Image (cartoon, rainbow, N blue to C red):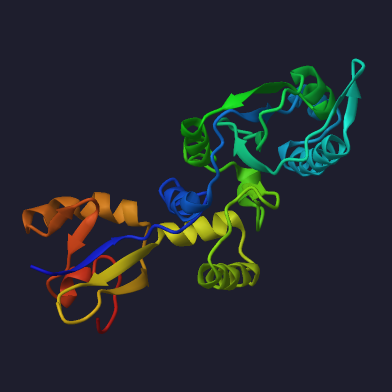
Amino acid sequence: MRARFIKEFIPRSWFHPKGVYKVVERLKDRLPDVNGSLFATFTLDRTYFQKNEIGPSEAFDLSRSHIRKVFYKLRKGVNWEDKFYKIKSPYCTKVEFHDDEEGWPHFHIIWLTKRFIPAELIGSLWGYGRTNVKRITNTEFNYLLKYVCKSGKVPEWVGEKKLIRIFQSSKGFLKPIEKAKKEKNLNSIQRRKRTYQTIEERLNKYRKTALLIDERFSDKPIMFRQIELNEEFQILLDRLVYPIAQDGRYLGDGKIQILNRKDIYPWINIPKL
């Protein structure tokens, strides 16, 4: 039997532990074959930055700018131990944050090239901390995309920012996007630019949002509606799940069947559904 039910709202967001999968799903058809491509991880030497009274937020901004210089030098070409090395291939950058209180960033870089580049050369160009250089597989790449903070907890300094670009790619790295999808994505980007909320403010809003879904009528499309909750969805679910289960309205996977208007009052008081 088709039903009306309420469930957790999952945003498309790098910073949401479930929403990140929506981001990756949207990228999936555009991802290149990276098997055997050059892969580098850049970390930051905390001791160096802290000695200069630089915290993770400012270090992130500085290192972002520095990575662009690394790309530029490799595009132009670098002499290293009497040999000339050059990378003009498309590339991408993915940032992650360490799972500790400070949440220092580190960066993953992929160049779509199978050329040999000495790890020592890349390390010398980076210079802000340790580097790890190897070849990557598609499986590793897919895993890499699914995490920003493996604990799911966003560092405080990250939450205070309004926007952080977690994944960036140069021209030619991603496969071309269809025109209709491109226009839709541009509209989405324009909407995001109009927001003045910080990342943490948006995450707090997501936590207190649910989807009201109506699929009772077979001759009509399924209707989705976002509703603002009195508290965080997970807190309300933990509190209400036992009586809901006793009523036989818990459908599993965080879905709660709504049989009448009173069923939604513990979640949010609205005069009419």
Looking at the rendering, which quadrant does residue 194 occupy?
Answer: bottom right
Looking at the rendering, which quadrant does residue 266 occupy?
Answer: bottom left
Q: Quadrant of the C terminus?
A: bottom left
Q: Position of residue 16 (x, y in %)?
A: 47, 50
Q: Position of residue 8 (x, y in %)?
A: 32, 58
- Identify the residue shown where x is 77% and y is 19%: 118
Q: Residue furthest bottom?
A: 272
Position of 92 with respect to 1 (left or right) is: right
User: For this rendering, which residue is in front, 224 or 74?
Assistant: 74
- Identify the residue shown where x is 82% and y is 24%: 48
Position of 240 with respect to 74 (left or right) is: left
- Identify the residue shown where x is 47% and y is 35%: 143
Q: Position of residue 127 (x, y in %)?
A: 83, 26
Position of 247 with respect to 148 (left or right) is: left
Q: Where 180 sits versus 160, above or below?
A: below
Q: Quadrant of the N terminus?
A: bottom left
- Identify the residue shown where x is 80% and y is 43%: 68
Q: Position of residue 121 (x, y in %)?
A: 82, 22
